[in-house]
Structure formats: structure tokens, C-alpha cells
Amino acid sequence: MDSAAEAEDMRFRVSPLTSGGRSAVLLTSDGIPIEAEHLSGAGGGRDLAIVVAHGFTGALERPAVRRAAAVLRAGGGVLTFSFRGHGRSGGRSTVGDREVLDLDAAVGWARRLGYAKVAAVGFSMGASVVLRHAGADADAGLSRVDAVVSVSSPARWYYRGTAPMRRLHWVVTRPTGRLVSRVGLGTRVHGGDWDPVPRSPVESVPYIAPTPLLIVHGDRDGYFPLDHPYSLAAAAGEGGADLWIEPGFGHAENAADEALLGRIGEWLTARVGAR
């Protein structure tokens, strides 16, 4: 095997699933193994891949992530993965910082599977990651996406304005909280501070255009109030994003029902197919 083939083999290892999809262990650019799965779309083609990025404490095997994948398959192939520190992936969660590299590994796998176009759909922490990934500087060396959907994203870092976010900050910043996260939530969290502090979602959004962007947020979101999606939409500029404020919708993938997921899939098909 030549050196290029050896490097390719080290980047991800793929094995078939009995469900008709494929599983893989992807190696991120900083050396973290990430578990991932691929499900072919309903038509079996390679026109569009939808990469699903879960929220904090999620994983690809969680029912809400599997539900999202099942619904989104109507519009194309679906790739799910577990962020670092989650599920059977390696490493420790950095709660939205280095996770951009995890998403990039999944997007790169979609390209290698032969998909012509790739969209990223993120929830909560995953939503902040898809925004930062799409809005990264060109010299960051990240894979390009053709559309972005952000569901229940924060606009800015260090937000503590709601009780759930105060609890989350306790979990990620205190040794006892990280122990609770590891034992009770199955999520391993890195103990260090961000250094440097990464570009926030609202700082990333202006750089996403002309890539189509959909921002989805619920008026019953207990984590991030409505100033977050409105700030993101404003940062995108006129015509830079579609904004859906969903009546009665709570937070992230656990609250996203099949009807909302189906509409997201239809938006992706319409917007990406039109490019």
C-alpha cells in the first residue's frame, strides 16, 4: 500500500451495517476517533447528504437523533455521528470548540462517499458547531457545505440567563459537575478553559453567505430565549438567512417532532436543489 492509501485508511475505517447503512470510525485532524453512521436516502442516490450534529449529552444512538435521521432520509442520505466525549467516540467534549473538527470529519466522509452536495443540520451545541464550521475562514482548511440548518443554537458564549444554562455551566466548569456528566449523562468533558476562545456563532454567521442558512428556534426554548435567534438572523444580514420561530417548540432534537423535521428536510431539498 502506498503512503496516500495508508493515510486514507487511517482517516476512517468503514464496515457494513445489517440495516443497509454503513458504520465508520472517523479520525479527526487532531487525532480523535469519532463513531459515525451512514444511511442511504430513500431513493438511494448520491445527490444530497445531510450530516446531523447532535446537542450536548447526545449521541448517534439516542432515540431523538435516530428519529431525525429517519425523517431526513426522505430528502437524501443521512450521516450521524457522536461528538468527541459522547457515545463511543474518543476524547473529551470541549462543548463546541474542537467539535468543529468532528463535524468536518463527517462532512469529509460524505464527500468521499460520492455525494454531490452536503448539508449540515445541528441542534443546540451541534447548531453552534455547524454555524462556526460554515463561517470559518477559508484558510482553516475545513470542508465546504452546501447548506446549513441551525436548530436551537446559542448566539453567544457564556450565557447563564436561564436555569438550564446555569446548571450546564456547573456541569462543565466544576470537577463534581464533570463527574456527574461522565457517570450520569455518559458525557466526558474536558476540564480546561478555551484557549483561545473560539469565534462565537453570532460572529461566525456573517461569513456563511452565500451558503443557504436556516435558523430554527422555539418560543418555548428553556435554554436560549428569542434574542439568540434574532441576533443570529440580524448578523446574517438582509437575505442572508431564513428564520423560523416555531410556536410551542422547546429545545433541540429532543423536542423536534416529525412535522418540523420534515419541513427542514423540504427546505433543504428546495434550497440545495436550486443551487
Image (cartoon, helix red, strand yellow):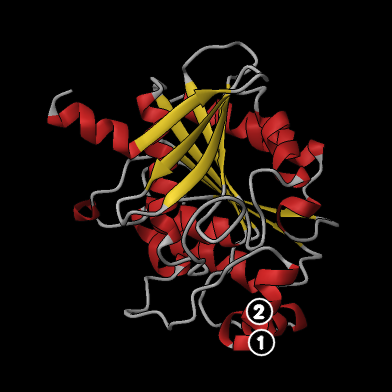
Q: Going by the picture, which residue comes out furthest to the front?
A: 1
| Circle 1: element type | helix
Indicate left or right for 120 with 222 as reference: left
Q: Quadrant of the C terminus?
A: top left
Residue denoted by label 2: 179
Where residue 41 sits in the image (x, y, percent)?
Answer: 60, 19
Q: Are marks 1 and 2 in contact (CB under 8 Å)?
A: yes
Q: Quadrant of the N terminus?
A: top left
Q: How dense is the environment of label 2, judged by Cα within 10 Å: few (below 14), some, or many (20 and up)?
A: some
Amino acid type at mark 1: Thr
Amino acid type at mark 2: Leu
Q: How dense is the environment of label 1, judged by Cα within 10 Å: few (below 14), some, or many (20 and up)?
A: few
Is residue 214 shown above or below 188? above
- The residue located at (44%, 32%) in the rendering is 118
- The residue located at (75%, 78%) in the rendering is 164
Indicate left or right for 35 with 177 as reference: left
Where residue 211 sits in the image (x, y, percent)?
Answer: 40, 42
Residue denoted by label 1: 176
> How many angstroms separate mark 1 from mark 2 (CA)?
5 Å
Location of residue 97 (image quadrant): bottom left
Where residue 216 sits in the image (x, y, percent)?
Answer: 65, 53
Is residue 260 shown above or below 42? below
Is residue 125 shown above or below 222? above
Q: Could you tell me if residue 80 is visible in this image?
A: yes
Q: Going by the picture, which residue comes out furthest to the left?
A: 2
How many callouts does the rendering have? 2
In the image, 47 versus 249, the foreground residue is: 47
In the image, 124 versus 246, the foreground residue is: 124
Where residue 134 sits in the image (x, y, percent)?
Answer: 39, 50
In the image, 141 versus 242, the foreground residue is: 141
